[in-house]
Amino acid sequence: MTDSTIFDKIINKEIPADVVYEDELALAFKDINPQAPFHVLVIPKQRIATINDVNEQNSHLIGHLYAVAAKLAKEHGFAEDGYRAVINCNEHGGQTVYHLHLHLLAGKPMGWPPYQDTKKGLI
C-alpha cells in the first residue's frame, strides 16, 4: 500500500479518535464532521482502498462492518426507528479517505434522495 491514511493512524493509535467499538477486525469512531446526531465511521483494520478493491479474500470484512453497524444501532437505541449505513466509493461517490469506511448515521429522519442540486434538479 501507499502512504498511510488518517484511518491507519487511528487504528495504530498514532492519533486520537472517539472510539465507540473495537474488535480484531474493525474499529468504529465518531465522525469529526457529523452529518446526523449520531454519526460514526466503521472501518476494517485491514485497509481496503475502495469498494472496487473488495475481493474474495477480504469480502467477509464488509459483512462484518454491517454487523457492527447493526450492533451499534441496537446499543444506541436507533435500530427500531431506523438509520442509514452507507459506503462511498471514489470521488463522485463522495469518498475522501481511501480506506473503505461505513458511515452509520442516525438520530433524525433521513431524506431521499440524499442530495438535490437546486439548479439541476435531482442528482
Image (cartoon, rainbow, N blue to C red):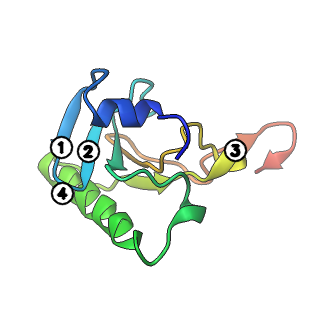
Mark sitting earlier along the chain (4/1): 1
Q: Nearer the viewer, residue 49 or 93?
A: 49
Q: Which mark is residue 21?
A: 1
Q: Which mark is residue 72?
A: none
Compared with 92, 96 (above or below) is above
Secondary structure state at the residue bearing disc 1: strand
Q: Quadrant of residue 58?
A: bottom left
Mark sitting earlier along the chain (2/1): 1
Secondary structure state at the residue bearing disc 2: strand
Which residue type carries mark 3?
Glu
Circle 4 residues within 10 Å: few <14, some 14–19, many ≥20: some
Q: Is residue 26 left or right of residue 43?
A: left
Mark pair 3, 2: CA separation = 23 Å
Q: Which mark is residue 27?
A: 2
Which residue type carries mark 1?
Tyr
- The residue indicated by pointer 3 is 91
Could you tell me if residue 72 is visible in this image? Answer: yes
Compared with 5, 47 (above or below) is below
Q: Nearer the viewer, mark 4 or mark 1?
A: 1
- The residue indicated by pointer 4 is 71
Horizontal and vertical percent position of residue 57: 40, 74
Q: Residue at 56% of width from left, 55% of height from top?
A: 50
Mark pair 3, 4: CA separation = 29 Å
Mark pair 2, 4: CA separation = 13 Å
